[in-house]
Amino acid sequence: MFLSDELYGQYNIDQVLVELIKTKPIQRLKKIHQAGASFLVDQHFNGTRYGHSIGVMLLIKRLGGSVKEQIAGLLHDVSHTAFSHVIDFVFDLSEENYHETIFEKVILDSEIPSILEKYHIDIKEIFDIDKWEILEKELPKLCADRIDYTLRDMHTYFGTPKNEIEAFLNSLIIVNGEVCVNSIEMAEWFTKIYYKLAIDYFLGPISIYSYNSLAKIIKLALQKEVINLNDLLLDDMQFMKLMQKSNDKEILELINSLYEKVELEENDQDYDIHRKGKRRIIDVPVSLDGKTVLQSSLLSDNIAKMNKIAIEKSEKGTFVKIKR
C-alpha cells in the first residue's frame, strides 16, 4: 500500500503497518489534537496525533529503520489522552509523561497484539522504546519523534517552507547510532525553528492559558465524579461533550469561558498565570566527516546563544495576564 505524507512524500509500506493503521487506537488519534487545549482557543492549531504518528513511521523508514522500528514509531503516541498533554497539567507532571504510564495497557487492551502475533512480531520488542536508534532519544539529541513534531507543527501552524524542510531532511544521517545533520548550517536552522515551537509556542501565552484553563475544568470534573480517568481515552470532542452533558453549572461556566474570545499578554509584574513547562533544550548532533559526532553548540556561537536564551526562558517560565 502506498501512503502519502505532506512532508515526506509517498512510500510503499508493509502490510503489517496497513493493518495496524486501521486499528481503533490509531484511528482514534485522528481526533486527538497535537496542540491539545490550544485548539479550543485557536482552531488554527488543528494538527492531529494521527498525522504525527504516520509521519514518525515514515521518517523512520526514510532513515533506514526496520519495519519493527516503524511499528514502534506508528504506535508511540497511541496512549495520548484527550487533548494530549493537558492531563499532565492536571496532575502537575513536569515531565509531561502520563501517556507513557498507560502505553502498554492501551495496546494490550486492543486488537494490536493479535496483528503483531499474526506477523510473528514480539510485542515486548515494540514496548522496548530505548532499543531503537531513530525513534526516541532523550534531549538534547535528535530523534524521529522530535524531528517530526517540530517540522510538522512549524509547517502547519507557522508556514515553514517545504523546500527548507526538504533541505534539512536531506542533511540527516545516522552515525554511530545517532541521528545527526551533516552541516552546521542545518543544525542552526533546526535549532532556530525548534525553539520557535518549544519556547515561543509551547511556553507562549495561548498554550499556557488554554492548558491551564482546561486542566482546571478537568480537575474539577474529576473531583465531582463527572468523569473518570478511563474517559480520558475518548477523543477530544467526545470528552468535551461528556463534561458538558453533566449540566454542572460550575463546569459549564468554565467551559463557556474557555471558548470566549480572550486577549492575553506576557507580563511578569502583573499576571494571572505563571507556568514552567517541560525543559526542552536541544543540541543537534553534527557529523561533518560521517564518522565523528559533535554537539552543534561547540561548533556554532549562534546555537550556543540560542541555547542560553532557551534555558533562561525555561527557568523563568511564562507569566500571562488575561485581559477580556
Image: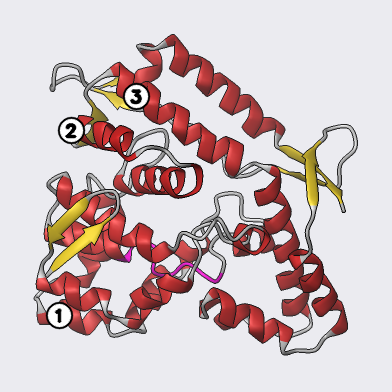
Q: Is residue 77 within the magenta segment? A: yes
Q: Residue at x 31, y 42 (%)?
A: 143
Residue 158, image x, y percentages: 50, 42
Q: Which residue is mark 3?
A: 187
Question: Is disc 1 placed on a helix, strand or loop?
Answer: helix
Q: Which residue is mark 2?
A: 173
Q: How many discs mark residues in the rendered view?
A: 3
Q: Is residue 103 within the magenta segment? A: no
Q: Categorize mark 1 by other alpha carbons within 10 Å: few (<14), some (14-19), many (20+).
A: few
The colour scheme used here is secondary structure
Q: Residue at x 72, y 38 (%)?
A: 318
* Image-based side of 233 in relation to 241, left or right: left
Q: Which residues are magenta?
A: 75-82
Question: Is disc 2 placed on a helix, strand or loop?
Answer: strand
Q: Earlier in the sequence, mark 1 or mark 2?
A: 1
Q: Quadrant of residue 83?
A: bottom right
Residue 251, image x, y percentages: 81, 77
Mark 1 or mark 2, which is nearer to you? Answer: 2
Q: Nearer the viewer, residue 110 or 149?
A: 149
Label 3 with label 2: CB-CB less than 8 Å: no
Q: Main secondary structure of the magenta part?
A: loop
